[in-house]
Image: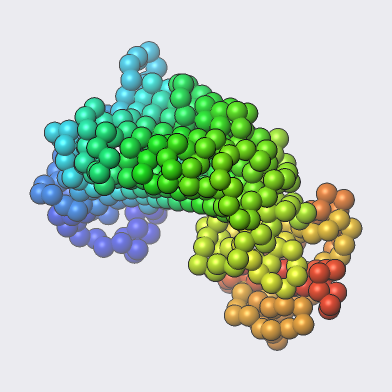
Amino acid sequence: MLRLALLALLLPTAAHADELWVDPVLGSFGATGTVTDPIMTVGEAIGRLAGTGPHIIWMGEGTYSVAGGEVFPWTVGLDLSLRGLSDQVVVDVRAVSGAVGAQTAIQLGVPATCSHTLGLDSLQFLGDYNDDAVRVCEEGHLRTSHCSFFGFGWVVPSPPHVGAGRELEFVDTRFERVGDVTHTTWVNTLAPNFAHSLRCSFIDCGSTCTGDMWYGQRTSGVYFEDCLVTGTGGGAFSAACSADWITGCTIVGNAGYGAYIVSSYGEIHDSILADNQSGDVQYAGGGVHASLVKDGSGYHHGPGVIVADPRFVDAASGDYRLRFDSPAIDALPADPQRLDLRGLPRAVDGDLDLLPANDMGAIEFRTLDRPRGLAFDVPLGQPYDLEFAGPAFTFTQLLFARDGVTGPTATPFGSLLLPPGGASRIALLQIGASGRRTTSVPLVGGPSLIGTQLGFQALHRSTQTSAGAAFTNAVELVVVAP
């Protein structure tokens, strides 16, 4: 009951016509649908909704599956947002033991043509190779945020008819081992259809069906921004649309082309394309601009194109962060408004010359960072790891501030991002031969530390400045309960 008590403090207790609460563990059939009396299944909650919406269904932590009473597909005929209340909300449409046949998790739109909007937030979807995640009607709109899709044959299969306005938006979403994300295919060249992926990861996709991972034909546009695409069984990106844009992406290690853009309007900007078996770029009639193309392929190379090895930390193990000596670091003008794949600000001084700039590719290089895969929260009582990057065998001085990260203070070594009077030196470290070094620092303190923001920055030796050293970017960690 502790979880219900906590939710009652955080969320409204009244169940309005546009909001219902569901919990696969604590819910029950026939419940009122409030935060303290949740319904057991999403299917029952959808059946209670009336009108066009918009509606919200809040989904409690746990697994939603046939074994738990769900009946798939969830059929949605109105504007609806499904929102997970934690990062452990799972929708599992895989067949139960002994069952056969394909499943669809969600069907948006009855009849096939509709103008409804479906939002999915903080949900994990699990499927088999013959399952579909979401079937979107001809003029429907799908938005995902902080979701993941694993194992599906299709995430969004093609609609059966010509549509005039289907829109797909994926934000901070991960696709792994799915056959195809979608074939966004339309015949009407004037239809305002588009598919937009922002800060998404596409890992080992396209392995269960032929063709390319993402295919757009005659839509108004397919847009990829700050995305990672690797390990697809076909090409990573294939499009013949009126507007195709790849911006700030890392497209690497795919079985087909990295980008195959037939349209004369298709352009590639600020990206890294490398080690794609059929070639990094084919066509791209609008040009490749300010990007690293390892094999130099493609047409109409614009200004700022680099033909070189991007020098990833460890491509063989899927670590596509950049090494300190990568030519993609600080290769673009500074744009503080841009975020990278992890949602962290770009415009970092990666080469330690006191001039912040943006990198090519999806993952901005940072001289001070958390090791790969680690979050920026630290459980109380456990040590925390920090990773340093720079020229091999150089020294760096780690600084710490209990009050977190603050606004910049100008110094001869660049911007100090910790409180000027509250930062202390805690370690002098030497970077290893690999250009990286990880160190573990104990977290000392009692429960009063929970919720505290801890700030870190390093003063690193640099031959790029007259002062002989430069401040790195800052890292802020939040202390959480163990």
Quadrant assignment, res 296:
top right
Looking at the picture, how far across and down is residue 330, in whole percent?
Answer: 67, 61
182 over 415 or under it: above or below: above
Q: Is residue 225 left or right of residue 85?
A: right
Looking at the picture, how far across and down is residue 3, in whole percent?
Answer: 39, 53
Residue most extreme to the right:
393
Looking at the picture, how far across and down is residue 12, in whole percent?
Answer: 26, 62
Q: Nearer the viewer, residue 231 or 97?
A: 231
Q: Quadrant of the C terminus?
A: bottom right
One can see residue 368 in this view: no
Q: Is residue 406 left or right of residue 384?
A: left
* Number of numbered callouts drawn: 0
Quadrant assignment, res 394:
bottom right
Colour basis: rainbow
Q: Is residue 46 left or right of residue 182?
A: left
269 over 417 or under it: above or below: above
Q: Nearer the viewer, residue 83 or 367?
A: 367
Q: Residue at x 20, y 48 (%)?
A: 79
Quadrant assignment, res 66:
top left
Q: Is residue 427 left or right of residue 121?
A: right
Looking at the picture, how far across and down is residue 255, in whole percent?
Answer: 58, 27
Residue most extreme to the bottom:
421
390 over 222 or under it: above or below: below
Q: Residue at x 56, y 28 (%)?
A: 256
Q: Residue at x 86, y 65 (%)?
A: 395
Q: Nearer the viewer, residue 262 or 28?
A: 262
